[in-house]
Amino acid sequence: MTSFDLAKPKTPWVIFGPREAVEFKKQTAALSAAGGRVYEVHARDLTDGMGVCDAFARAVGVPGYFGWNWDALVDRLDDTHEAVTGGVGIVMVVHGSDALLGADHLKVFMTMLCLAADRANTEVDPDGNLRDEPVVIEHFVFLLDEVRAEEFAAGIEDPDLVVRAEGEFLTVALDLDVWRPKEVGRPKVS
């Protein structure tokens, strides 16, 4: 049993695991069957922040005003429209993720993905106010060919994140005690 469900708006937002994991295939199929979308990028295109922005922007499309930086990426992934999400949500699948082990930008990359997903998957803002946008399921899956998921933990560990090894998977989410210390600003758990 895994702690993640890619077809629901609940943490963890980022999951590393083996390419052949049946759980990934089953859960992405469930999201697709519900009308959600699965997008794919390759880690060879994610060698730095600009590469990440470019690859993710090409995958989901960007408006003309896209800022091509980490903050713009968070905003874009939080502000996905129905054509991108199917009105349900997205899972971004990163192939060949072994290449990211030891990358200088890995920690900030994971933090930005968690921020975007937290905002998209939450019906309230950090102050506890209802958001104008609907909740959109958003998760990021990093498929590994040979590297074990737990090997990424040391490069991601940060006080802002909760990083957990769960069997053959490594999960990453925001530490809500840091990011949303007031209960009113936290997402509802279903």
Image (tube, rainbow, N blue to C red):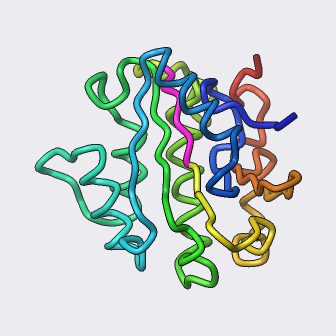
From the image, give the main secondary structure of the stretch colored magenta: strand
Where does residue 71 sit, x and y in percent of width and height? 39, 58
Q: Is 40 left or right of 177, judged from the image as shown?
A: left
In the image, residue 11 above or below residue 131: below
Q: Residue furthest left?
A: 64
- At a point 37% along the width and 46% down the height, the residue shown is 75
- At a point 40% along the width and 30% down the height, the residue shown is 37
Q: Nearer the viewer, residue 156 or 22?
A: 22
Dividing the picture into quadrants, the one containing residue 101 is: bottom right
- At a point 72% along the width and 60% down the height, the residue shown is 160
In the image, residue 57 above or below residue 128: below
- At a point 55% along the width and 84% down the height, the residue shown is 104
Where does residue 132 sit, x and y in percent of width and height? 41, 20
Q: Quadrant of the N terminus?
A: top right
Q: Is 188 left or right of 118, judged from the image as shown?
A: right
> Magenta segment range?
135-140
Where does residue 33 sit, x and y in percent of width and height? 49, 17
In the image, residue 92 above or below residue 89: below
